[in-house]
Amino acid sequence: MPTLHWIGKDKVINHHMDVPFKVLEHAYGFDNGKQTKEETNSGNKIIHGDNLEALKALLPEYEGRIKCIYIDPPYNTGNEGWVYNDNVNDRKIKKWLGQVVGKESEDLSRHDKWLCMMYPRLKLLHKLLSDDGAIFISCDDNEQANLKLICDEIWGGGNFINNIIWQKKYSPQNDAKYLSDMHDFIIMYAKNKSLFKRNLLPRNDEQNNRYKNPDNDPRGVWKSSDLSAKRITEKDLYEITTPSGRIVLPPKGRSWVVGKDKFDELVKDNRIWFGENGDNVPSVKKFLKEVQDGTIPVTLWLRNEVGDNQEARQILKAIFNESNAPFETPKLPRLMERIIRLATNENDIILDSFAGSASTAHAVLNIMQLKIAKGNSF
């Protein structure tokens, strides 16, 4: 398997083992919306501090127990104006690199520095993830290629699930020098691909509205599905006579999806649709009540489904009651909700170690509130 080498790698490859264990000291909590110094039994934790030390501190209690990890690390754009400095020349990073890597750190490129920062954190996250869990990592083109290679090394290339494309913008940038970037990546790995089971995503109104009932079938709404498939199977090549008397065959290069006997059974059960006038090429009726309770996730996540950067800023402005959001590019709860629904079930543990504007926690609260309102399961 191809591996990635950079200056300082030999110093950080096992650095997670050298990070000292520290005890998490309880500062305050919330009970029925009121701040208290007493520990609560919600099971939720917000940890303030260096996330490398915090991840190590979580190991005694949570090693192998986290079902879903989402992180939104610095994109390494070189931007120094964000609330969370996105420049790997930040003095804190330089100090840490000097301590861990030594004099070599003076010659590192910004990509070397970013990789040195990320590697030990990913190693600890791998330890925390459950055997049937998954990790989702946001990034853009600045480090996507490097991130994929170090994740292949830590998680194993065979545990790569998908590279999700999230449409983060609605409008192109008119001042773009080359192409206007409209998306970010969310790289997804399983701890053990054979054990990870993804969930279906909830059906939405747009998907359900595709089902109609033009013939008033007592089994309810349905939509027509192609009766032919792109293959040639001799037993599935036969003439069909429509109610109007027209004789039809499968399109060129295709066969019917069922044999003649099965087709006759479907006709008898009123599961074949020939159109309102009985003259169309036949199709199969798929009833909504018989389809799986959800939809298979896809790798393209559009803004109308999970929101975009603009929506995320508006949400944050409303929370802080300010004209400007305190974070330039927060992730939005709708995006996090999709990840959580896809990868977790009730009582699973979720971790975000680059919490930023706390969008992941916001999404968990949204899902729990919806569950309470509907009085149903996760």
Image (spheres, helix red, strand yellow):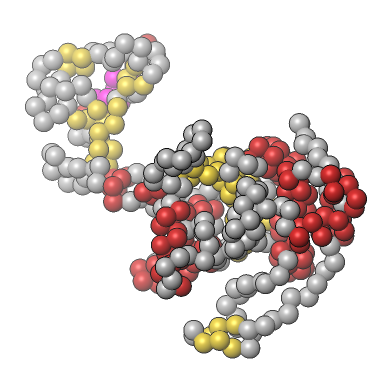
Give the main secondary structure of the magenta stretch. helix
Name the residue located 87 percent from the left edge and 58 percent from the top edge. Answer: 99
* Residue 307 percent across, percent down from the top left: 41, 53
Residue 130 picture quarter: bottom right
Query: Where 73 sits versus 242, above or below?
Result: below
Query: Where 21 sits versus 27, above or below?
Result: above
* Residue 374 percent across, percent down from the top left: 35, 68
In the image, farthest residue toward the right: 103
* Residue 329 percent across, percent down from the top left: 52, 56
Name the residue located 48 percent from the left edge and 69 percent from the top edge. Answer: 365
The foreground one among 152 and 77 is 77
The residues colored magenta run: 259-266
* Residue 61 percent across, percent down from the top left: 73, 69
- Residue 194 visible in the picture: no
Query: Where 87 sits versus 290, above or below?
Result: below
Look at the image and say whether residue 120 sits in the magenta stretch: no
Q: How many marks?
A: 0
Instruction: Name the side, left or right, on which 362 lies relative to 280.
Output: right
The foreground one among 347 and 48 is 48
